[in-house]
Image (cartoon, helix red, strand yellow):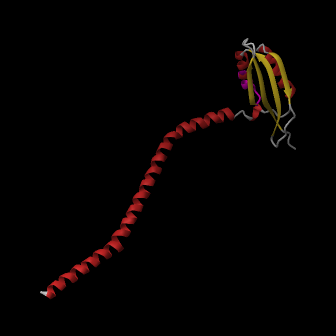
Amino acid sequence: MFFRERQQITICVVAGVVVCVFMLFWYLPLHKKIKAIRQTKAAQSVVIAKGAADSRKLPLMKEQLLELQARLANYEANIPEQNTFGGFLGRIADLMNENNLTEQEITPGEEIKADKFNCIPVTMRCKGKLTQIFKLYRQLQRLDRLVRIELVKLSNDSDFSGQVSMETKAFIYYRAKTG
């Protein structure tokens, strides 16, 4: 009987050791690998879903690219090769007169030179109704020359007569001479 009990205990101990060895050396490493594979699979699914969503945006982005290319096609054409600054300032003064703006002042600053493009800062001041001033800005935007508006300051008159004083700092560009 004692031998039989001992045999059963030995069998149980051996079975326990086999189960522990199985758990430590086979099941746990495989379980870790399976968990890592599931995480990788989930991350790849997220990447695939993002790629699918981005691919649906591709036609819209292509349309935007074509639109930008069309807008920028004449970009350099809007920057003349020579400094025709005086004539351009005259056109701005004509636009101010056309919009019946008063107290006009157009003051050029000192030329800023760069490698490809040079620019001349210009301060413009005038007075008129807000609709007249906005019309002037729309006309400036449609000119065939690149003008970058840096600052716009609009001030209402103290007597609230509907007149607005405008001060604008802008940069007018032209191509630098090479050679």
Residue at the image position 15 percent from the left and 88 percent from the top? 3
Relative to 36, residue 140 above or below: above
> What residue occupies the far front of the structure in this picture?
158
Of 47 and 6, nearer the camera is 6
Q: Quadrant of the N terminus?
A: bottom left
Relative to 156, residue 59 above or below: below
Of 103 and 10, nearer the camera is 10
The x and y percentages for residue 109 are 86, 31
Relative to 53, residue 103 above or below: above
Left or right of 106 in this view: 72: left
Number of numbered discs: 0
Residue at the image position 65 percent from the left and 33 percent from the top? 70
Residue 95 visible to an observer of this rendering: no
Q: Which range is magenta?
A: 138-147
Tell me if residue 144 is in the magenta stretch: yes
Of 144 and 93, nearer the camera is 93
The x and y percentages for residue 173 are 80, 33
The x and y percentages for residue 102 are 81, 15
Q: Quadrant of the C terminus?
A: top right
The x and y percentages for residue 163 are 74, 14
Toward which corner of the image does residue 27 lie, by quadrant?
bottom left
Residue at the image position 53 percent from the left and 40 percent from the top? 58
